[in-house]
Image: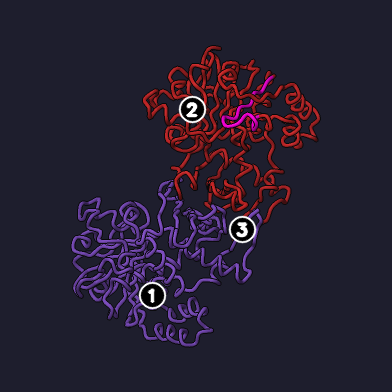
Chain colours: A purple, B red
């Protein structure tokens, strides 16, 4: 009999804060670069093309003595059944014994670790004095991308928000965004007055602006984060000014694309995992179209974090971080949650 | 919030009986042959070669509206830590919505569905009047192989048991085996007097004999079931008489082998899944050594069950069923357990 902890979404959310998740995701990337972590092959299945699919991402964090998997289902017709389209689970096991430790709903982890990834891309690749962030996409991912970038890039003064289908959606997203970000992300820091005030002032110092002028917004941005399910490039090469950094977090399956593949030709390209980026990331199309080759990927982001590969060489470089989302981000976050939950007695424990 | 049922080993065991599992596994094989079920690619990882590994087998049973996975860990050093070497879990999700339904410990399911597989191989490929069963291996799998075969082959009079490392183990295994089989497998039939008495008399009519004379035992057997983790052939071609049926259930990873690869040259070969058998089954070595080609596999067992492929053509045929163990067996059994558990209010229900 093994004690096995099961955590629901609410409990997972209670135990997560963005600062912690950023540290965890940086650690996962670093462990991978040090060969202290490994991804297993991804399993992907389409139940009905364009309507329903699932994937199983799994891996081993030797540096944390855990392995496990995340299964994510996407069923596009679910809202008509009063069910969310995306559901997912993370399972964690002990890599010294193979014994399972716990599981939890995957939605909160996915949003937080994906938010952390976009910000980490900016932290290590964007110009330090970047002031202007452009967010493409106003879905579930967007607030998480904004918050992590505000936490990591202290000079941000303006966040422009673009929805490629509707200005109205972008405007609605921006309305009272300061208050929404504070409510969503700052409560974990209430006991740490200094941190709370620092993050609150980061949010307050920013002007949030909705736009339908994507060409103009692109030309003014220092950092562009794309977080859409697009299958057509939204941002054209000609619009991009020197020095821009891209964190592309939307593409996670073959065929998805958010930025003009020609941008890759003259950019410094970094990814979370080479094999996965080539297969399902923003990097897939530029390679398939022959714009770049796999060898043009300079490194995985972990090497930049560790300092073994230089990210940006000059203020004029265009940099790209292709974040496909790797199981190691989920596993390290889930492991943290399970340890916190055990210490605090949160969740259900079954004897398996 | 979704209700998600978690079942421990004891509860799983309570809800399983061999007759039911045989029917479920036959249904899974049949659905696969009708293209109403599909396996996803297997994920296999060795943490430490020969000492610790894990695999994730997953698939979709369209015919039952479920998909899911089984993760099995094998850590050879676990007994020194007072832990079982094999641990595993089965997860079931709804393939109409992607929403998870439940999970359970995988050990009891694995033993039962693997037992069912060996017996089903005999039912569809051995001579109907087979009287003599030889079991190679005296580990956890052996009693399950014996019970399913006794249930399915009504003329069995003698079961010879061989352990290739020790006669003592085989002798110990055979001692009071009748009583052990009755205790382990017959309690679910106590309320069905006819069935109980039929299965009890099947066990009672059998003579259980331990042997260290494998050549002689092979030459006398009608049905041979191999259920060992061997990496060297235990049974040589020259010892096998015409008409023998083999159910090979031990080989489940590359390099494992229980019977002389030359036996395949003149045998009628059936498998549970062609891709998996070629990769990790008893069929792997004969193909790698060029004894047979992949195309010499006559069919998956489901086609024989459905009657679209003939199993045995004559009483002199040597037949082989290579059972590698497929996720569909686990999923269909787990789905049955979850439905029973829901009806009877067994297990823990978490709101995820």
> Disc 1 vs disc 3: Cβ atoms closer than 8 Å?
no
Q: Measured from the top left, where is residue A131 in percent x and y?
A: 29, 80
10 Å crowding of disc 1: few (<14), some (14-19), many (20+) = some
Q: Pointer 2: residues within 10 angstroms few (<14), some, or many (20+)?
A: some
Q: Is residue B26 visible?
A: no
Question: Which residue is at a point 42% across and 26% down the rendered structure image?
Answer: B286
The residue identified by callout 3 is A4
Q: Are marks 2 and 3 on the same chain?
A: no
Q: How many marks?
A: 3
Left or right of A244, for residue B70: right
Q: Sequence order check: which comes first, mark 1 or mark 3?
A: 3
* Residue contact at pointers 2 and 3, CB within 8 angstroms: no
- Mark 1–mark 3 Cα distance, whole angstroms, equals 45 Å
Name the residue: 61% across, 61% down: A5
Q: Measuring 42% from the left and 74% from the top, which residue is drawn there?
A: A172
Helix, strand or loop under label 3: strand
Task: Give the CA distance from mark 2 to mark 3.
Answer: 39 Å
Quick one: A114 or A139, which is closer to the camera? Answer: A114
Q: Which residue is mark 2?
A: B233
Point out the stretch of residues depicted in magenta: B158-170
Is A310 on the left or on the right of A114, as rendered?
left
Q: Is residue A114 magenta?
A: no
| Residue B130: percent from left, percent from top | 63, 17
As for residue B169 lying within the magenta part, the answer is yes
Q: Are marks 1 and 2 on the same chain?
A: no
Locate residue B181: give its quadrant.
top right
> What residue sits right under mark 1 in the picture?
A171
Horizontally, residue A269 falls left or right of residue B332, namely left
Chain of the residue displaying label 3: A
């Amino acid at each position: 009999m093994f004690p096995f902890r099961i955590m629901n979404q609410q409990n997972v959310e209670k135990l997560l804060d963005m600062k912690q998740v950023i540290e965890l995701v940086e650690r996962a990337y670093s462990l991978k670069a040090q060969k202290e972590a490994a991804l297993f092959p991804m399993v992907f299945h389409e139940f009905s093309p364009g309507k329903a699919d699932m994937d199983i991402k799994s891996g081993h964090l030797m540096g944390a003595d855990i392995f496990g998997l995340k299964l994510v289902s996407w069923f596009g017709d679910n809202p008509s059944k009063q069910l969310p389209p995306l559901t997912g689970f993370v399972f964690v096991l002990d890599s010294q014994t193979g014994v399972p430790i716990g599981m939890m709903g995957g939605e909160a982890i996915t949003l937080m670790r994906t938010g952390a990834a976009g910000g980490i891309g900016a932290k290590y690749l964007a110009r330090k004095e970047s002031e202007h962030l452009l967010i493409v996409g106003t879905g579930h991912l967007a607030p998480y991308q904004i918050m992590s970038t505000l936490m990591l890039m202290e000079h941000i003064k303006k966040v422009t928000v673009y929805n490629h289908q509707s200005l109205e959606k972008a405007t609605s997203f921006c309305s009272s965004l300061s208050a929404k970000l504070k409510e969503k992300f700052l409560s974990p820091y209430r006991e740490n007055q200094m941190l709370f005030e620092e993050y609150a002032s980061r949010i307050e110092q920013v002007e949030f602006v909705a736009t339908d002028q994507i060409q103009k917004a692109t030309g003014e941005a220092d950092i562009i984060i794309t977080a859409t399910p697009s299958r057509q490039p939204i941002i054209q090469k000609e619009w991009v000014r020197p020095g821009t950094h891209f964190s592309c977090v939307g593409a996670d399956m073959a065929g998805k694309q958010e930025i003009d593949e020609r941008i890759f030709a003259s950019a410094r390209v970094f990814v979370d995992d080479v094999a996965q980026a080539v297969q399902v990331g923003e990097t897939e199309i530029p390679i398939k179209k022959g714009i770049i080759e796999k060898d043009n990927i300079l490194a995985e982001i972990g090497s930049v974090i560790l300092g073994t590969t230089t990210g940006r060489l000059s203020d004029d470089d265009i940099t790209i971080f292709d974040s496909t989302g790797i199981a190691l981000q989920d596993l390290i976050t889930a492991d943290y949650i399970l340890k916190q939950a055990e210490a605090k007695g949160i969740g259900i424990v079954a004897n398996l």
